Image (tube, grey):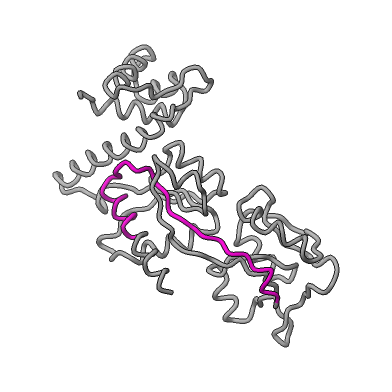
Amino acid sequence: MNIESKWLEDFLALAETRNFSGAAGLRNITQPAFSRRIRMLEQSVGAELVDRSQTPVALTASGRIFRVTARTLVNQMVEGISHISALNYSDGSVVRIASAHSLALNLTQSIQAQFSDESRPMLSVDAMNVDEAVDALREGECDVLLAFDNEHLKLAPYDHIKVGTADLLPVCAADNKGQPIYHFEHDNVPWLAFTPTSYMGRQTETVRHEVSLKPVFLSSMVDMLKLQALNGLGVAWLPDFAIRTELSQGRLVVMKNKALNRRVSYYAYRYQSRLHPSGEKIWAALKKIATDNSFN
């Protein structure tokens, strides 16, 4: 197999822009020459990587997998050159993580805590709604995905780790006696709800059939709903890991109806193809976090 490094960079530019002329411009070559190089890459790989029948162009299933491989190979070359020139920053590779909003802060901090300052890989974290984050992994736009239970991502060509579980707890602000300011025995309790199309929204949608709720605010972001709850504007179902401080301080209280709790599991996902060294370090750190959580 004879693959030139410039072809890999061409392919990554095309995967980013989804446009041959735009990618050719980024690579400072003519479009015909750029198209020939992409064809030569496909011939060397032995598979079509780009679906040219769509506008904008799309990556094929093989192309999405190869995008991860191409980025890993380019990162490894950059890392090797950096070591040789003694100019490496961190270990030369940035680990691209796509994460559900509600998991981004907590898991990023847990990952970073696994390393010393000198050995900690550089992370680039994009927090987004769950469905967008899943798409980012499928399109090869990230190295690692942090999200919730997804049966499709537990099958080849993906790998996964169950990192932990969380309880979605109904919480609200407390009165001056430390008691909830809202009660489910009342009608039309103001509900600070996740957007119905979000993962959390789908998990909590059933509670409206068990108690009388009136949606007053919608968001896909945990921190946004938490702020509204702290301000006394309603009841929100929030993951336990996101409200530990507020509960311990008495600023939020859990409504006393355990039947309304919802449990979710959260995972790390990746393609099975090997990541660059920093990516593998992060994957190993996630395995350690999963092991630690299993004993808690």
In this orientation, which residue lies closer to the viewer: 121 or 208? 208
Q: Residue at x 30, y 64 (%)?
A: 115
Marks counted in the figure total 0
On screen, residue 178 above or below 62: below
Segment colored magenta: 257-285
Residue at the left extreme, as displayed: 84
In this orientation, which residue lies closer to the viewer: 5 or 47? 47
The percent position of residue 136, horizontal first and vertical second, equals 48, 41
In this orientation, which residue lies closer to the viewer: 210 or 85? 210
Q: Residue at x 80, y 67 (%)?
A: 189
Quarter of the figure with residue 31 = top left
Residue at the right extreme, as displayed: 187
Q: Residue at x 32, y 21 (%)?
A: 42
Quadrant where the image shows the N terminus = top left
Direction from residue 274 to residue 81 in the image, left or right: left
On screen, residue 285 above or below 126: below
Quarter of the figure with residue 275 = top left
The percent position of residue 77, horizontal first and vertical second, equals 22, 38
The percent position of residue 90, horizontal first and vertical second, equals 26, 54
Residue 169 inside the magenta-drawn segment: no
Residue at the bottom extreme, as displayed: 177
Q: Residue at x 14, y 44 (%)?
A: 84
In this orientation, which residue lies closer to the viewer: 46 or 110? 46
Quadrant where the image shows the C terminus = bottom left
On screen, residue 87 above or below 138: below
